[in-house]
Image: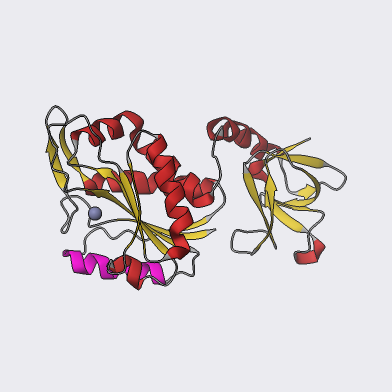
């Protein structure tokens, strides 16, 4: 999956920042800070899952119109499957908290991204936020002007004390994970554990011949490429615990049998496998 990810608005204090709100007992909360926290973690998680991801955030356009047109220009410079815009909502005007959270909503231009949007709403609602649902919006600039199918996520409300308390409790990492699991339609559980084993397994692979040896996949999903590098086409996907027959390792990429890529093989990164 190739995607463009961006946080909405200019960076906090650098021009056309997003909404801000003062919540009694919490203090100031700024959309442009929180959307970037979530955005950075979304990108990190997508990359960890071997997805090509571009950060199309614009930090200091000066005006909201310029911010939007620069974001769209960045997005349309890449050929991707999906554009994702990350925002925090406002307009509930419940800074004191009424015991009711306001929740998440996701906007789509058309039906193409409805499934992804529904999954994201569902995942975020599992964190405790109300599911305000998916809305089709034809007039949102980012949705209308981006070439690839797009979604705009309003994670939760920054002017609703109940939302902010819940958001502070679950954290931006959980918010990002809910989004990425919705985008990829998969669970990212045990990522921390598998990371640890990835680090140790990386060191075990050296350049050279591995013919006759096997390895087990440690990532939840591992892309098989046409050749050594993420710039090559994905020609297959492996699941966690799949066992592959190795061929030759070079620069962290090992060729495997059973695929029809370059030289009649497939190529996977050794960070995501362990030698058997
Ligand atoms: Zn916004």
Say which residue appears at 53% left-offset and 32% top-offset. 192
For the record, the magenta segment spans 62-76
Q: Is residue 115 left or right of residue 132?
A: right
Considering the image in quadrants, where does the N terminus appear? bottom right
Q: Nearer the viewer, residue 76 or 164?
A: 164
Q: Nearer the viewer, residue 59 or 160?
A: 160
Residue closest to the far right: 212
Say which residue appears at 78% left-offset and 49% top-offset. 208
- Residue 78 percent location from the top left of the image: 45, 69
Q: Is residue 264 left or right of residue 222?
A: right
Snapshot quadrant of residue 165? top left
Considering the image in quadrants, where does the C terminus appear? top right
Q: Nearer the viewer, residue 186 or 137?
A: 137
Snapshot quadrant of residue 129? top left
Based on the picture, tell me whether residue 227 belongs to the magenta stretch.
Answer: no
- Residue 182 percent location from the top left of the image: 48, 48
| Above/below status of 8 relative to 240 | below
Ligand 1 rendered quadrant: bottom left
- Residue 44 percent location from the top left of the image: 45, 46
- Residue 17 percent location from the top left of the image: 18, 54
Say which residue appears at 69% left-offset and 48% top-offset. 238
Q: Main secondary structure of the magenta part?
A: helix
């Amino acid at each position: 999956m190739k995607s463009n990810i961006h946080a909405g608005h200019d960076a906090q204090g650098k021009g056309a920042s997003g909404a801000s709100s003062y919540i009694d007992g919490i203090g100031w909360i700024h959309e442009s800070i929180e959307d970037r926290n979530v955005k950075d973690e979304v990108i990190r998680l997508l990359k960890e899952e071997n997805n090509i991801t571009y950060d199309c955030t614009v930090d200091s356009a000066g005006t909201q119109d310029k911010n939007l047109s620069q974001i769209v220009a960045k997005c349309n410079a890449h050929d991707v499957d999906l554009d994702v815009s990350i925002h925090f909502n406002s307009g509930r005007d419940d800074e004191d908290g009424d015991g009711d959270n306001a929740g998440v909503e996701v906007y789509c231009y058309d039906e193409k991204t409805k499934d992804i949007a529904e999954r994201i709403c569902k995942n975020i609602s599992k964190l405790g936020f109300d599911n305000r649902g998916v809305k089709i919006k034809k007039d949102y600039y980012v949705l209308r002007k981006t070439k690839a199918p797009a979604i705009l996520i309003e994670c939760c409300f920054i002017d609703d004390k109940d939302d902010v308390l819940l958001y502070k409790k679950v954290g931006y990492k959980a918010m990002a994970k809910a989004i990425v699991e919705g985008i990829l339609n998969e669970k990212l559980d045990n990522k921390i554990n598998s990371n640890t084993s990835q680090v140790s397994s990386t060191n075990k692979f050296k350049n050279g011949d591995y013919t006759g040896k096997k390895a087990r996949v440690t990532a939840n999903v591992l892309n098989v490429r046409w050749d050594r590098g993420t710039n090559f086409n994905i020609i297959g996907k492996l699941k966690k615990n799949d066992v592959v027959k190795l061929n030759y390792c070079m620069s962290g990429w090992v060729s495997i049998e059973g695929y029809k890529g370059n030289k009649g093989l497939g190529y996977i990164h050794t960070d995501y496998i362990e030698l058997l």
